[in-house]
Amino acid sequence: MTSSPARIFGLRTILVLVFAFLYIPIAVLVALSFNQGGLPTVWAGFSLKWYASLAGNAAILSAALNTLIVALVSTAIATLLGTLLAIGVEMRRQYGRGLEALIFAPMIIPDIVLAIALLSLFSMLDFTLGLHTIILAHVVFNLAFVCSVVRARLKSFDWSIVEASADLGASALTTFRRVTLPVILPAVIAGALLAFTLSVDEFIIAFFTAGAGRASTTLPMQIYSMIRFGITPEINALATIVMAVSITALTLSQRLNRGVIGQ
């Protein structure tokens, strides 16, 4: 069935409008982060001074360090546990939909519900809120994403080579290190990059599970506290940096994941 020129033109117009709706606000934010003037909506010339001012802002630097600590530690733990979970589930293929739902529940549960549930758990266990509770909370939802990416690679994994390795006398640890891990490593790295991106951007769960004071304030929380007094070019610059880090990590994750799916 061939489409008429008018139909093709209409579909292209809709596509352009959708992309414009999605990306014009982001482009405006990035452009205004280089604004010389102090007003966020009036262009006064190109300048990098707002990026330079971020380097001298103690609150922002502290929040950036906290975000980096949370993202790196939670990513490391979630990657380890998510990879092991994916291998365990795929090796034991006799699982029901109930187990599948349990594994991926953190991905579909609304953030506000998960945040309240985690806060209730920490309160019940009498945990003092701080960076450690944010890390634990991020591990909970990051684990499901890592498991999903690694399982996509394991779907095409030939388990007979694992059995062959065992028949040749290799231990389970040696088999994993020399046989399984090299095959699934691109997926593991892709899952880790995705987890890192989600952790850097996450706000709601961190807001509910963080302690009081600057010691457990992450960058998204810092941006929220700054934006309550109005949008400034400094906030635009900070948001642009966070977005650049997230896009870079997500792009690397997609490239690795695309290679994994293609194998």
Image: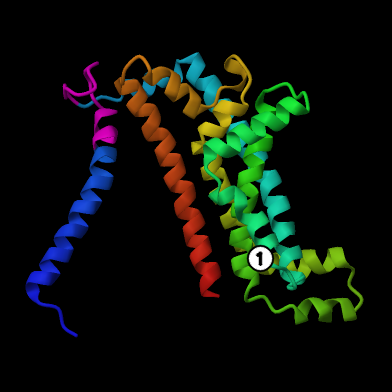
The relative height of residue 153 versus residue 149 in the rendered view (above or below) is below
Residue 185: image quadrant is bottom right
Q: Residue at x 65, y 70 (%)?
A: 154
- The image shows residue 249, relative to residue 117, as above or below, that is below
- Magenta residue span: 28-45
Q: Position of residue 174 (x, y in %)?
A: 84, 66
Question: Residue 107, how many percent across, how many down?
Answer: 56, 50
Is 184 on the left-hand or right-hand side of 51? Answer: right
Is residue 92 visible to us here? Answer: yes
Residue at the spot 70% in from the left edge and 29% down from the top edge:
132
- Can residue 193 be seen in this snapshot? no
In reply to whether residue 37 is colored magenta, the answer given is yes
Q: Determine which quarter of the picture holds residue 100.
A: bottom right
Q: Residue furthest right?
A: 169
In front of the other: 101 or 227? 101
Q: How many marks?
A: 1
> Is residue 109 shown left or right of residue 12?
right
Kind of residue at disc 1: Arg
Residue 8 included in the magenta stretch of the image: no
Quadrant showing the C terminus: bottom right
At x 60%, y 48%, the residue is 106
Residue 164 location (% of width, % of height): 82, 81
Quarter of the image with the N terminus in it: bottom left
Question: Within the image, what quadrant is residue 7 found in?
Answer: bottom left
Instruction: Depth check: give the residue in front, 43 or 5.
Output: 5
Direction from residue 98 to residue 50 in the image, left or right: left
Vertical placement of residue 260 versus 140, above or below: below
- Vertical placement of residue 165 versus 173, above or below: below
- Location of mark 1 (residue): 97
Q: Residue at x 67, y 75 (%)?
A: 157
